[in-house]
Image (cartoon, helix red, strand yellow):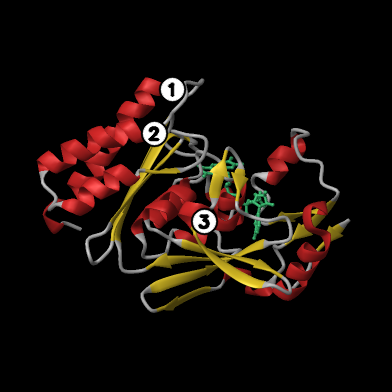
Amino acid sequence: MLYQPQILEEALTLKADLGGDVDALAGGTDLLVALSRGQWRPKNVLDLSRVVERSEIRKADSRFSLAHGVTHAQLTRLPVRALAEAALSIGGPQIRNRGTLAGNLGTASPAGDGCVALLALHAEMELTRAGRGSRRLPVRDFFLDYRRTELRPEELITRVVVPADWTSAWHKIGKRGSVNISVVCAAVARSPQGRFGVAFGSVGPYPLTAPKTEALLNAAALTPELIDEAAAMAQTEVSPISDHRASAAYRRAMCGTLLRRLLTEHFLNGRD
Ligand SMILES: Cc1cc2nc3c(=O)[nH]c(=O)nc-3n(C[C@H](O)[C@H](O)[C@H](O)COP(=O)(O)OP(=O)(O)OC[C@H]3O[C@@H](n4cnc5c(N)ncnc54)[C@H](O)[C@@H]3O)c2cc1C
């Protein structure tokens, strides 16, 4: 059965009533690929693409609050550099026009570019269950294991909340210039108070943060020597595998290289 609610309350009620027997469908850029490969055989589908409030972006208290259906195309225009750059690297124009940030989180791919930006930015997400209200969760607590998340069967991701006043940057290494799944991607963000966030994609079972590297960066003023130390530390915090795209050793080394590049180009001497 295909459900196509037009208001969020109705979507939430259907999800709460049907739980694991209904799958949320946003832009379909992951799910329809899985469907065509025979990897997704839904009992019921909850199409969120007609919910009227889905594309809303609000700004309040130095934060952007992004509704569940905000697309990557919308994010390319958001003045949050890491997230905008990550969004711009996703697929081609058609994929960016359909694909959503909530879908990127829901898929929980290790290579999820939007997820990596959100982790560095210490973003939060809102998970909602009809009748029980919403719970706010740091995106850092969302990923549990390979494609396993904190999302409960009766819940939907309703919002993502991102700081508007952090400096941030993001970079991806891929095999080609566009429609490019990351071999490694990295994001760095810094709050106005100097607190760092560092995250990597495609180097573990899910998008990863680098807490020891962050602690190192938080403890002292940024210098070229500290950047070298952080780049070395970051390589010890990831757990890449070798596959057809790259070896584990290359991915590990590139985590250090990308971190050094992002810190030097965007954060050293208060640049950017
Ligand atoms: C050609 C191509 C290139 C791509 N390139 C990239 C790339 O470079 N980088 C990248 O990161 N991804 C890439 N992707 C993957 C995909 O586009 C993204 O992951 C996208 O963000 C998925 O969003 P969606 O709205 O299409 O999700 P959908 O396919 O609709 O859903 C994905 C998952 O999220 C769940 N979901 C969606 N919305 C909600 C919600 N509100 N609450 C709870 N669960 C929800 C669904 O149930 C499903 O499990 C690519 C895909 C294609 C086909």
- Residue at 41 percent across and 56 percent down: it is 83
Q: In this picture, is 218 found above or below 49?
A: above
Report the amino acid beneath label 2.
Val
Side of 174 relative to 188 (left or right):
right
Residue 133 falls left or right of residue 236:
right
Are there few (<14), some (14-19), or many (20+) residues within 10 Å of tag 1? some
Q: Quadrant of the N terminus?
A: bottom right
Does the Cβ of the disc 2 residue fall within 8 Å of ligand 1? no
In this rendered view, identify the residue nearer to me: 36 or 128: 128
Identify the residue under disc 3: 72
| Residue type for callout 1 | Ala
Upstream in sequence: badge 1 or badge 3? 3
Q: Is residue 242 visible?
A: yes
Count the marks: 3
The span from disc 3 to disc 2 (Cα, nearest Å) is 26 Å
Instruction: For mark 1, give the secondary structure.
Output: loop
Name the spot of residue 38 as percent of width and height, x first: 78, 34
Q: Amino acid at mark 3?
A: His
Q: Secondary structure beneath disc 2?
A: loop
- Mark 3 C-beta closer than 8 Å to ligand 1: yes
Sort mark 2 into few (<14), some (14-19) or many (20+) by Cα contacts within 10 Å. many
- The residue labelled by disc 1 is 246
Q: Are marks 2 and 1 in contact (CB under 8 Å)?
A: no
> Secondary structure beneath disc 3?
helix
Q: Earlier in the sequence, mark 3 or mark 2?
A: 3
* 3 vs 2, front mark: 2
Q: Which residue is mark 2?
A: 238
Residue in view at x 56 percent, y 45 percent: 144
